[in-house]
Structures are given as C-alpha cells and as structure tokens.
Image: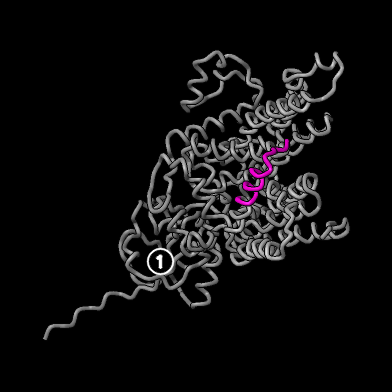
Amino acid sequence: MNINKNKTTLAVPILLGIMALSCLLSLRVKSPTVDEFAHLPAGYYYWKTGDFSLYGKNPPLIKLLCSLPLLAMDISMDPIQSYADRGDWRPWVFGTHFMRENAASYDSIFFIGRLPAVLLALLLGWYVFRWAKELYGPKGGLLSLVLYTFSPNILAHARLVTTDVGCTCFMFMTIYYYWRSFQHLRHKDSIGAGICFGLALLSKFTALLLVPILGLLLILSAWRRKQEERGALLSVFNKLRSGFLRCLCDGGVRLVLVILVALFITNLGYGFQGTMKRLKSIPHESQFYKRLAASPLNSIPIPLPAAYIQGLDQQKLDAEQGVFLNYLRGRLSNRGWWYYFFYAFVVKTPIPLHIGILISIWWALKRRRVAQADAFLILPVLTVLFVFSFFNQINVGLRYVLPIFPFLFVWLGRLSQLNFTKSVLRWSAGVILVGYVLSSVSIFPDYLAYFNALAGGPSKGYRHLLDSNLDWGQDLKRLKNYVDKEGIDELGLAYFGHVDPGIYGIRYRLVGERPESGEIAVSASYLYGLPYVITYGDRPVSIKPGAFEWLHTHRPTAHIGHSIFVYSIMPEPNSLPQR
C-alpha cells in the first residue's frame, strides 16, 4: 500500500508527539540521575561565571543548553564558591550545595532543565525520518521513525540532562550532511556537516571519532566513484582526469571545509579561551598526552581551546587508571571486557530489533550490492563499537555507544522495500513491528531499566548489568510514593545516587554492612556488589563490594522501578526467659 504525502505529513508529528509525551510523563516521576546531579548545576554555573572548569571532563554545550531556561528562574548560587580543591568530586560537591540552597524548587529546576534534552531527541527523530525517507521513500522513513520513537534506550536518555542524546544527535546530523555533500556536491551541505561536527565536539568527546569516520568515508566514496567511472564512455581529457586520486581530491576539499567549520564552532563554544596554545603549555596527566608531549607535536599550536584539551586529558586518565569498577554478570573488573557492549546490546534491545537486523543482513547478502549510503550508515556503527570495545576500559552503560542507534534505525528502513507477496509474511512483519512497539510501551516509565525477554526482563536485569543500564539513582521519587502508600514512617536506605531523600520528604537512616531489621530499601547496584560513595548523609560513606550480601537471604517485598529493592525484615525473636 502506498503512503501518500498527506498521510506521511500527519504520521510524523503524531509519532514525535507520542515520543514527547512519553518523555514528559516519565521524566516527571524520575529523580535526577548520578550524572544529571552534577551536569545541570554546572551548566548554570557556566552561564553565571563563564568558567568552564567546574566539570571540564565533558564539553559544555549540553549543560549550557539544558540550564539556559534556568536563567529565568529564581535560583540561589554562590558564583565565587566553586570548590576547586575537591578534585574529581568537585562537580558533585557543587551539585550538593546547589541542591541544599534550592531545596524547595529542586524538583521544578530539573523538570525545566530536562526539556531541552527532549527537544534534542525530537530533532534527532526528525533527521532519522528525513534521511530514511530520502533513501527508501515515505514508508522507509516512517519505519525508521517508529523504530526510533519507541526505542527504550533512546527514550531512557532522551529525558536526561546528560551528554549522550545531544552527542548522538549532532554526530548523526554530521554524517547526514556529509553524505548529502557527496550526493549533491554542494558546499552548503559541507558547511552544515561542519556546524554539526562542531556542535558534536562541544557535546561529548566521543564525537572525536568522527575524524576517522569522515576520513574513511572519503576514501570509500572516492573508490566507489572511480569504479562507477571505469565503465563510463569518457572523452580522452576526462579519462586522464578520472581516477581514484582525482575523486579523493574532490572529496578532500569538502572534508577540509567540514573540519575548518567544526574547529571554528568548537572554539566559539569556549569563547576562544586558550585557543592555539602549545601542548607543552597545557597541563596534562595522562600517558596518552605524555607520549604526545615527547613528540614534535609538543611545540605545535593546537587549534582547540586549552580547556577542551585538558578535559580530554582527564577522560584519558580515567580510562587508563580504571577509576570505574565495571560489572558484568556478577563479576567486577577495572579493566572491562571487550565484548561488554555487544552483550549489553543483545540484552538491552528488543528482540524484534534483532530479528530486523538479521533480516536486513540476509537481504543485503542476497542482493550482493552495497549502496553508497550503506557505508555512511554502517561505518559509524562499526567504528563506535570497535573503539569502545577494544580501546576503552569504562564499561558502565550501553549509553556510551548510543550514537549507533539512529544509524541502525535508518539502515533498517530498507525493510519497507521488501515485497511480502504472501499474506503470512505480511502478517509476520506486522506482528514483529507491533511486538517492538509493545516492548517499549510495557516498560513505561522505567525505560532505563529495560531488558528484553531473552535476559529475563527488567526484573532480572541485575543478573546482567548494573549502573546506568539499570540503576542510576532515578527512582527516589517513586520510592517516596511507595513509602506514602504503605504508611512507612522511616526506612533504612542505601540508594545509588546523590539527591538527598529528604528533598522528597523521605525519612530514612543509612544502612550498611551490619544486618538490620525493619523496612530496608537498597539500590540494585549496591545490592549486587557495585561500590560507590553515599554523599547525601551527614558525611560521605563508602559502599564496598559485597556490603549487602546479608540481604541476599531475604525475599524483597517490592521492586521500585526495577532499580530499588525493598525488604521487610522482622527482628530476631528474643530468647525465652529462664525459669
């Protein structure tokens, strides 16, 4: 059945509207996650001071965008006090004081601050539809958009003040406009790619992967163009000009333009602070930069802000030192596993998506023909997965490879071109698509905790992955609803996050390694061995691996959002008095 223009025009805003509604309704019941707790206050601090050092481990753009609406609110903050002596914990110490000073309006601050993240997710959805429509027609565009708007992993992070969706959005838009520059040979598409590349670099350091991706795409495009010209009837002059080198030079001009525009946008984002400093004059600690400092690059001016270089250095240092303890299927490691992200993708994406990927691979092999667009869609996926699997030791969430998802969704739009001649096949395709949508609807509003049936569902997610895959401090508000419903006056609590439970009116006492009785609520991350630091009490408390093994002999009475386990533990009976 053909989908006419009017139906497409109507379907796109409906799908994006459903996504926006899902995000708004779910973010209302979710407390700030571990990273949000520091990101949003840092962005507000940037606006008030112009100092990007508070949370320099991430570029500032997403924090600035999300905190922009806060400038119209009555918010208390001391711009002089930045806690520069607190080291890596500085953003969270600042976030704690920000929370204390704005306790009455804290919930409203985060509701408003999350709205720009939702808008970025909607912008990304529009571009997913746009590219798929250009490749596969209206049906392909709508199929890709359905896959995007009902993706549990996209919905999970589309509501959060973090860098993941913003970086994913601008990386995708960069590749889209870069593809268009090869299709239409227009400089305005190259400039568009450069602007988006710069915005991606200002969002997250992951965007630096665009440098090798764009370079490889240039080589592949030049090679394909040479192959196409080989069989063409050309004049003698054109034959002399044709070839791989000429094609490479033509594309190279566009790539240089993209990079120059991206560098301008990146420096503009930092107000050109510290631009063109020599590496030897920029403080650095990681082994990666020490090796660069021992090379001739040490004396060459760097066309990036000094704060950008320092932030990247700190990220590299974290990766080298293994500061994050990683969890996979009950095991802990500070080195990670090369197959972590492949495993996380298998268990945290809907099974119908896996079926669609297998069908698409089968169809591509059967056709034995690779379109130019396939390289622009698949190469970013392979590059991101390869780099994060083999050159990264931080395994704390599938969100690190979130940029692969929109490319996959567009690539799967090709399935709309399959000719299902038999009614059984048409019905099967419909059932698979409905199953995909239902997998998203059924997990609302707990998208962050999504695990497919193959993994045992969200209730068994802790058996596979923790941290931002399941329990990121997002369910404190829902715990408050449970406490009120059950009439619990006070409970023992150890939750994986930074927001003071008292902000939501939860009366609690901290619990730890010593067995206790009464109503006990513990986050899945702590319960199954992931260490962290509780900062919302009177003093910081370190939670060590295995601290809550004493709870494993008890059966939980409730699961809050699949991330917090609640126990009702009776006190030990007193011994009978002697007669």
In this rendering, position of residue 525 left or right of residue 420: left
Q: Main secondary structure of the magenta part?
A: helix
Does the segment drawn in magenta span residue 70?
no
In this rendering, position of residue 524 left or right of residue 428: left
What are the residue bounds of the magenta stretch? 358-372
Q: Position of residue 169 (x, y in %)?
A: 69, 44
- Residue at 23%, 78% (x, y): give it: 574
**Total marks drawn?**
1
Q: Position of residue 399 (x, y in %)?
A: 57, 48
In which quarter of the view is residue 481 placed? bottom right
The answer to whether residue 26 is seen in the rendering is no
Tag 1 residue? 492
Does the segment drawn in magenta span residue 360?
yes
Q: Is residue 371 above or below residue 149?
A: above
- Residue at 70%, 45% (x, y): give it: 65
Q: Nearer the viewer, residue 577 or 151?
A: 151
- Callout 1: SS: strand
Q: Quadrant of the N terminus?
A: bottom right
> From this viewpoint, which residue is outermost toward the bottom?
579
Applied colour scheme:
one colour
Q: Quadrant of the C terminus?
A: bottom left
In which quarter of the view is residue 335 placed? top left
The answer to whether residue 550 is seen in the rendering is yes
